[in-house]
Image: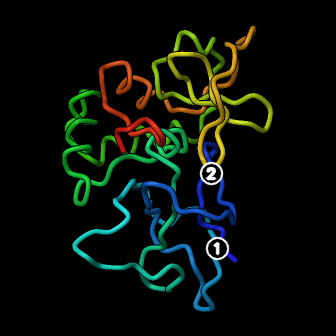
Amino acid sequence: MPLANRIDPFGRRAALPGRGLFTGNRGCLVTHAGAITRASASPAWLICTLVWRQARQPLAAPHTWTPLFFLDEATAFAAGHRPCARCRRPAFQALLAATGHRRAAELDRVLAVERRAERPMADPRTLPLGAMVADGLDAYLVAAEGVRRWSMAGYGPPEPWPAHPLPVLTPALHLAALANGYPVVIQGSGHE
């Protein structure tokens, strides 16, 4: 049975099959018994590569960071994570350039505030491609042809644009990056 370390666009952990394209890091989240007991132990919520320098990270080891898994970078962005400055250096530098920030600590402070803020409402047609919105308990990717329902297995087929504004899951910092051309990785887009 999988651990509850798969992250959805709402930032929630779930025990779902599949790892996705990226791993994430919020610090050490497990007890000595290996149970995940907290949502975060670090102000830096990172998007990392699945494997870095051929090292494998234990899934539930105390005293070290706990791997989380994302379907893709659009999911991780919606959950309030940013690219790691070490294992995803080019993506991290692209995010700095697209947002006008100069340091990781600045990004982390902004994202920490935005993760706790009330979700703004918007017409999905006004959002940049790669943003995510919520409709009830479901998350949707904003795509060129409409919205696509999210699942850990991938995105559903394009659906018509909603007729009403929806809560925006993607934090404002990431919306700005997407609008400024940040090349977000979306599962199934051919750019993984």
Residue in view at x 69 percent, y 14 percent: 160
- Horizontal relation, residue 140 to residue 82: left or right: right
Amino acid at the residue labelled 2: Met
| Residue toward you, 112 or 172 | 172
Which residue is most to the right?
A: 136
Rendered position, 18 above or below 159: below
Mark number, residue 152: 2
Sort mark 2 into few (<14), some (14-19) or many (20+) by Cα contacts within 10 Å: many
Sort mark 1 into few (<14), some (14-19) or many (20+) by Cα contacts within 10 Å: some
Residue 126 location (% of width, % of height): 53, 10
Mark number, residue 3: 1
Amino acid at the residue labelled 1: Leu
| Residue toward you, 57 or 186 | 186
- Horizontal relation, residue 24 to residue 133: left or right: left
Residue 106 lies in what quarter of the image?
top left
Rendered position, 4 above or below 138: below
Rendered position, 91 above or below 26: above
Residue 88 location (% of width, % of height): 26, 53
